Amino acid sequence: MARRQAGSGIEGCLCARMRQLHGGHVRDACTKAIRLPNSCESGIALVRSVRTGSFIESPGDAHVVYRAALLHARTTRRELSLDGQCTASASDPSRLLDRLVGSLTESGMAIVDLNEPASVDELCRLGALLGSAVPELDPVVQPYVEAGVVLNLISDDATDEPNLAPFSTNSISLHTESSGHRADEQPRFIILMCVEPGSAPQWGQTILVSMASVAVKLTQAQIDVLGRTYYSRLAGVGPPIVRVMAGRRVFSFRDFGGTELQWETKSQGPPDGSDVNAALRALLDSMYTTEPTSIRWARGRLAVIDNSYFFHGRSRGFAQGRPRHLVRLRILSTQAFGGDKLSCHDAQLST
């Protein structure tokens, strides 16, 4: 491989530094030099290697088998229990929130059975006590939107259209809500309420997997790599795939299934990015081997999920009889209700 002729000035110094790092050759395909704020005595910015690459699963990956078992209802899941809880009313959102806030702040999840499903207005008033509602702007979903922020999720039939998967009987892989957005644009809370559980409520269950439980299965080296790796389109604005928030490890990641994920990392490692892809596979394995919790829906059942505590997904639905109907309202974090400051910068993840 022929060497590139170094230029003069800063560009020449950067090229020379890259040759030192890569055995005399400048690697353009997988690395590039970026400037850091610190300056050396010569006034030349220090450099850090940035690697780019992509991840796509293989049929033989272990998590593919685990995912099928979890999402296609071939494995037993622990269901959230409401034993001993009486029904509540949504007519007084403040009193309803009082019922939810203890569990929500302690465990990142709260669930209650309403005597009747909340109206759109009641749901919006409850959401306003938690923060500001996220508008539903996707043109594809507008026929299902009420009041600009409440999305009706009616599972009619299977579909091959990704944007319509929430309105189908398809399973939905585990993910962080809005993982492809900046941290300050990701909802902190997801409110789900059941209007109609459908003919087979044992199907189409909402599945929750604790991020804390996923994190403890990863090695420190894998955490360090993921803590400096971003979706390519988010590089420079964050968040990384894992970050620290209020002392907890929080993931911003979606299982893309067979779709390619383009990434960029500021971690040091081999030019082929094999360490990043290995860490992503380890993350997926951990997501699908961690014990899940599921919500079996019943009319009037309402759940509030903290998006910084859980991955969530959905098991395959039932295509015959009455369709399942949930409504969803997404809420941005507020400082008034435990709105921990989110950082888009690299986090110190070592313990």
Image: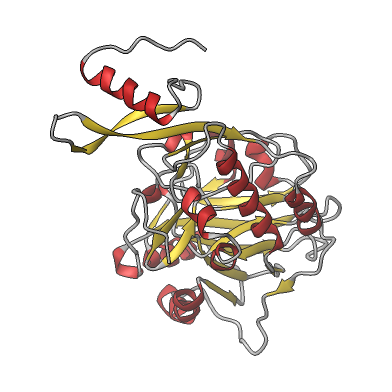
| Residue at screen point 70% across, 58% down | 288
Q: How is the image coloured?
A: secondary structure
Whether residue 67 is visible to the viewer of this picture, yes or no, is yes
Whether residue 169 is visible to the viewer of this picture, yes or no, is no
As drawn, 94 above or below 253: below
- Left or right of 5 in this view: 215: right
| Residue at screen point 61% across, 53% down | 283
The residue nearer to you, when weighing 238 against 74, is 238
- Left or right of 33 in this view: 181: right
Q: Quadrant of the C terminus?
A: bottom left
As drawn, 271 above or below 10: below
- Left or right of 268 in this view: 204: right
| Residue at screen point 45% across, 41% down | 268
**Can you name the residue that lies furthest to the bottom here?**
84
Measured as percent of width and height from the top left, residue 250 is found at 47, 59
The residue nearer to you, when weighing 181 against 211, is 211
Measured as percent of width and height from the top left, residue 205 is found at 72, 62
Measured as percent of width and height from the top left, residue 69 is found at 81, 57
Measured as percent of width and height from the top left, residue 17 is found at 33, 27
- Where is residue 209, by image quadrant? bottom right
